[in-house]
Amino acid sequence: MKEFLKNPHKSIFEHKICIENARLKEKIRAMTIQYNQSYGLNETRMGIDMAIQTKSYLKLAPYAMDELFKLGALNDPLWNKSTHGQGETLDFKLYEWTFPPCLGPKPHGFVSEASRAQGVIPMATSDFVEALFNADRWRDMFVGMIGRCTTKVISNGARGSRNGALLLMKAKIQVISSFVPVRVLNFIRYINKHAEGLWVVVDYSVDFGTDRRLTRRCPSGCILQAMPNGFTKVTWIEHTEYDEQLIHETIVG
């Protein structure tokens, strides 16, 4: 409000953006302090290069988390019922108008695809979080889809839980189609306990570089809500960008 009084010519929308940016910057600062102090991420242990790299990964985490959570909460008209079966598809024009590009502009020649689905699984929320933290268990959950996967643990989490866990992952994803090539992703997986019984697990691409064989993983992942019967309600969001030229001409023709 003080800022608004200083410059009343700015629109209320612009002031809201400024407030949101300030909130996210403060969250980045708090997260960096938390990792440096609580998880032992200091330059003497990790090396200067790794410390700088880790801070760059952390810088994107609150933006990716915020976007994923909003994508899970918003409905029509941002999400529309899929015409090919269950689930929903994203209205990209409305998405681009609503969300700033978390990972920067989409590479030239790349196309986007995004979907959302919900369901209930007979597994405790804490067990599901643990499975997503462990690469072998994650691969077993999606048999035939997750290929070779390597993981570097940056943080195990805080105070005996996975809250704040941070993983650097590289994985090969096989879409169940002989026409679609294996997708290779380099990404961060960040796990956050949003509230009691509510967890968010977000993936976002890093170190994308200029390799057009890589698939860019925009903020994707799941929102997990514990249920009274011990099961977990899952909202799963997939959002990727890839080079259309790599797809078989039968698919795009």
Image (cartoon, grey):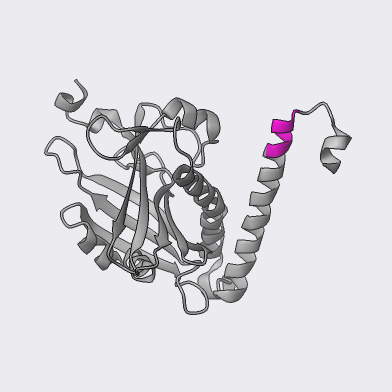
Q: Residue furthest right?
A: 6
Say whether residue 77 is magenta: no
| Total count of labels | 0
Snapshot quadrant of residue 234: bottom left
Task: Please provide percent x and percent y for residue 75.
Answer: 45, 37
Q: Is residue 48 left or right of residue 171?
A: right
Snapshot quadrant of residue 108: top left
- Residue at 25% of width from left, 67% of height from top? 136
Q: Is residue 167 left or right of residue 147?
A: right
Task: Please provide percent x and percent y for residue 197.
Answer: 46, 66
Task: Please provide percent x and percent y for residue 130.
Answer: 35, 70
Q: Is residue 226 left or right of residue 139?
A: right
Span highlighted in magenta in the image: 11-16
**From the viewer's perspective, is residue 107 above or below residue 71?**
above
- Residue at 42% of width from left, 29% of height from top? 92
- Residue at 49% of width from left, 33% of height from top? 105
- Residue at 58% of width from left, 75% of height from top? 38
Snapshot quadrant of residue 81: top left
